[in-house]
Amino acid sequence: MRKNYIIVLFSLLLSGAHVFGQKADTLSITLENVQYPYPVKFFKIQSEGQDLRMAYMDVPSARPNGGTVMLFHGKNFGGYYWTNVIRALSDRGYRVIVPDQIGFGKSSKAFIHYSFHQMASWNRSLLDSLGIKQSVILGHSMGGMLATRYALMYPENTTKLLLEDPIGLEDYRTFVPYTSTEKQYQTELKATAESVRKYYQSSYFTQWKPEYEELVRIAAGVGYSADFPRTARVAAMTFTMIYEQPVVYEFPNLKVPVVLFVGLEDKTIVGKGLLSPEQQAAHGQYKILGKQTAAKIPGAKLIEFANCGHIPHLEVPAEFMVALFGSL
């Protein structure tokens, strides 16, 4: 079962991907040449004098149960890596809404002030446009920070908040040295396929598997685009957003049912490369942070996954699905 979920995810992405180590595919910065697992639509947004497009998948169920789940992706991903979760939810009767946030995936790479508050309001507007008043919100990594902000702003529209290894369980400002957006931009420009792969291997998974190469291919492919500097700048802007807009102090204010899913081997730190090995060892310990965070949230439920890193829905898919459906 675990293997089947992984196969479903990657078989529905682009076929014919190059083996890592060979020349990577060149991808556009809005992933036009990456086929998502379900049809992609666009929601029009105006912000700071710019006309933007927010990509999203709206996946109905053949046997609708009346429920809707919205999925918020992490910083280094887009809606494509939710394939196995979308399919499982749809099979269980849920309508699934999967946006690529502005600045990510197939959405516009805008030079604007990035804000979790603004992103949450755009997602609320998207759901309003689809006639969806209430939904479950599942957020992974950066999407967990966004999902938390969304639930704080729209508790009446959030039936449940599900957080999969969310970042922001610590206030990074208290131990990660400040770096300007411009300096972070210079760092982002240096990204290569090999550096992306190395980061994913060391930060996201306990054991590297060949099927994870597709994630690297997509993430690294935009680096070969002539427009890559634009994506790099947006990546730096959203790094600043994460650093400067913590949600950790507001967990006690959540007024919706919350389930926290945590891989016990996750050691994610935003700005990890700015820390010494000793500092890295003192932070990002999700086996501790998960329990601390659950204790802060009224009535929260904590589900932990052994031998799992930052992305349970990919690394331990069968276990994650059981936990997910037991929490809906």
Image (tube, grey):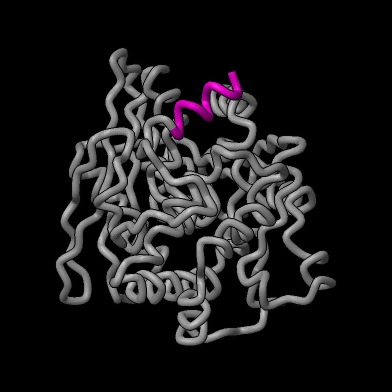
Which of the 4 image quadrants contains residue 130? top left
Any part of residue 149 in sight: no
- Residue under the image location 32 percent in, 28 percent down: 95
Q: Quadrant of the N terminus?
A: top right
Residue 302 falls in which quadrant of the image? top right
Q: Where residue 208 sits in the image (x, y, percent)?
A: 66, 43
Q: Residue at left 19%, top 49%?
A: 42
Horizontally, residue 126 falls left or right of residue 4, namely: left
Q: Is residue 24 magenta?
A: no
Q: Which residues are magenta?
A: 1-10
Query: Does residue 222 appear to the left or right of 130 in the view shown?
Result: right
Q: Nearer the viewer, residue 143 or 66?
A: 143
Our reading of the magenta stretch's main secondary structure is: helix
Tell me if 202 is positioned left or right of 178 in this view: right
Q: Nearer the viewer, residue 107 or 322?
A: 107
Q: Is residue 196 above or below residue 308?
A: below
Q: Is residue 41 above or below residue 274?
A: above
Please state the horizontal and vertical placement of residue 23, each as a whole percent of the image: 44, 56
Estimate the x, y position of residue 272 in percent, counting from the top left: 67, 69
Q: Is residue 292 above or below residue 85?
A: below
Residue at x-position 37% and y-position 23%: 90
Instruction: Name the residue rendered at 72%, 44% in the picture.
Output: 206
- The picture places residue 264, in percent across and down from the top left corner, at 75, 44
Quarter-of-image position of residue 268: bottom right
The question of residue 6 being in magenta is answered with: yes
Query: Which sits in the foreground, 132 or 179?
Result: 179
Q: Is residue 141 visible?
A: yes
Vertical relation: 126 (above or below) 5: below
